[in-house]
Every structure is written in structure tokens, then in C-alpha cells.
Amino acid sequence: MILKIKNLKLLFILSLFIVSCSSNDDGPNQLNGNKSGYSLTIEGDKTYSGAWDGDSEEGAIISLYTKGDQEEGGTEYISLIIADDPNDFSLNGALTLNSQTQQPLPLGNLANDDMEDADHSSIIITIGDKNYISNSGSAKISNFKKTMFGPFSGFASYDMEIDGKFDLTDTKTVEQIKIKGTVRVISYL
């Protein structure tokens, strides 16, 4: 387990140096084929979006693919990090893939569970001082491609549709908020 954590840390650090994305030239909701980006609508709030191609100090999208050792079940994961400084927006995803369909398992709340169970996926969105933690719903991917740089790890490219209920945890009582939208991740390797 310690070896896996070290490998994931190494992948994350490596990805920060290799994969980053650039300024939003097309404006909101413009996820064309050459840019990584996101467009998410938060119930009762608004639509947040950004897109980049190349290097940028404003934002980044990084997605890593990891496949577990066959002795441990060979579970496949996608980790996703989006940082959009101008919008004070970040998204962190831990997506566990179904081995037959190559689709993320349904969304749940990973913060309340043991990561070893690997029976659902989780997304946490932070906008300003608000945190939205996935509770239920789906994250479906298409155009999934892996760029491997070792036998068990690499970068992932895909389009993702998110449709779920998220817990807004920064209020006195937890509110469930619907969040829906798209994410496009392009690996430039």
C-alpha cells in the first residue's frame, strides 16, 4: 500500500511538470476538440467554465490513469485535478472504473468511506469557500484514451458528463445540490 501511495505521489508531481493547460480564448462553454476544459452548472448558483490549450498560469487540468497489480484485483482508476484560479474553482476526482465497461462506478461520498472498498467514484468541487462533495449520480466518459509511461500508470484523455447530487457542506445543515455538466481532458503527450 505504501508503494502505491508513493507511486501516486510521483505521478502527481510528474504530471504537474508535464501536463498543464492554457488561457481561455474562446470564452465560457466553448469546449472544442483542441482544448481541455469544463462547464458545470450548479443548481441555485450559475455555470462555471474554463478552457485551456498549452501552458497557463490561470488554470490546469491533469488526469492520471492507474491500474492496480493483478494480484490485488487489477482495479483501474482515473484521478482528475482541475484548477481554475480566475474563477476560484477546483475539482478533484477519484474515479474507479468498471473493468468490463471502462466507465466510472456511480458517484458516492469518498470522504465518508474507506478508499480500499473501491465500490464507487467521488468528486469534490470547491468554489471560493464552498465545498461540494458528490453523494450520488454518475460521471460517464467517452473517447477514453490512455498514454502509458509505465506498466501500471499513465495519463488519461476523455470527455466526461457529470450528473449528480452533491452535498454542500459549508452550511449549518448539509444541503444537496444538483450539479451537471461536462469536462474534457486532453493529454498533450
Image (cartoon, grey):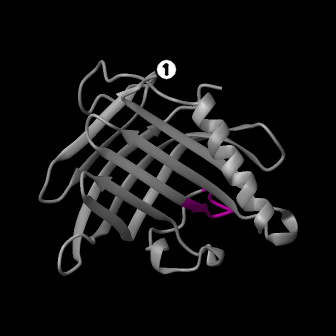
Q: Which quarter shows the N terminus?
A: bottom right
Mark 1 — residue? 54
Q: 153 or 12, which is in the foreground? A: 12
Near-viewer residue (178 or 81): 81
Residue at 34 percent across and 59 percent down: it is 163
Question: Which image quadrant: the C terminus?
Answer: top right
The quadrant where residue 77 appears: bottom right
The residue shown at (32%, 24%) is 24
The percent position of residue 91, horizontal first and vertical second, equals: 40, 51
Compared with 166, 148 (above or below) is above
Range drawn in magenta: 95-102
Expressed as whole percent of the image width and height from the top left, the position of residue 180 reads 29, 54
Q: Residue at x 24, y 43 (%)?
A: 48
Residue 38 in sight here: yes
Q: Amino acid at mark 1?
A: Gly
Tell me, yes or no, whether the highlighted magenta stretch contains residue 96: yes
